[in-house]
Image (spheres, rainbow, N blue to C red):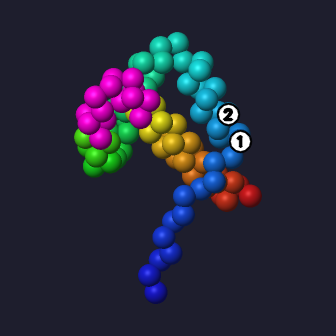
Amino acid sequence: MAPQPQKLPNVKKEVKASILRDYQQSKNKTQYLANWWTDLGKKQPELVELLYAEIKGFRDIKQAGAFAHAVFLVYSSLESQLEADEMNRAWG
């Protein structure tokens, strides 16, 4: 029997608050996001290639920035929630 595909987690308010707090408390938000994109590129090169191609398609730099920021919020929230769920399963 094939393994069941992993479902995306439901992001809880604690994870949302943590993501927003870490970003808001960063001294240099531009550098914070640049570092995040660099790390994502190391973990998910194919995904980043796809996302960069989409970002380059925006004519308005503000729209491209908003898209890139949304990617950061969605991916980091899902990733953090997965980690939190795994720790909760491991520690009960």
In the rendered image of this protein, does residue 92 appear above or below residue 49? below
Q: Which residue is mark 2?
A: 17
Are the two marked residues, 1 and 2, in contact with CB atoms closer than 8 angstroms? yes
Characterize the magenta stretch by its predominant secondary structure.
helix
The residue at the point 44 percent across, 39 percent down is: 71
Q: What x and y, as percent, mark residue 21?
A: 64, 26
On screen, residue 71 versus residue 88, left or right, reads: left
The residue at the point 60 percent across, 18 percent down is: 25
Other residues around mark 2 within 10 Å, as few (<14) / some (14–19) / many (≥20): few
Quadrant placement of the C terminus: bottom right
The range drawn in magenta is 54-67
The residue at the point 59 percent across, 20 percent down is: 24
Q: What x and y, as percent, mark residue 70?
A: 48, 36
On screen, residue 84 versus residue 53, left or right, reads: right
Q: Which residue is mark 1?
A: 13
Q: What x and y, as percent, mark residue 19?
A: 59, 33
Residue nearer the viewer, 90 or 71: 71
The residue at the point 28 percent across, 46 percent down is: 50
Residue type at mark 1?
Lys
In the rendered image of this protein, does residue 63 appear above or below residue 76? above
- Mark 1 vs mark 2, CA separation in Å: 6 Å
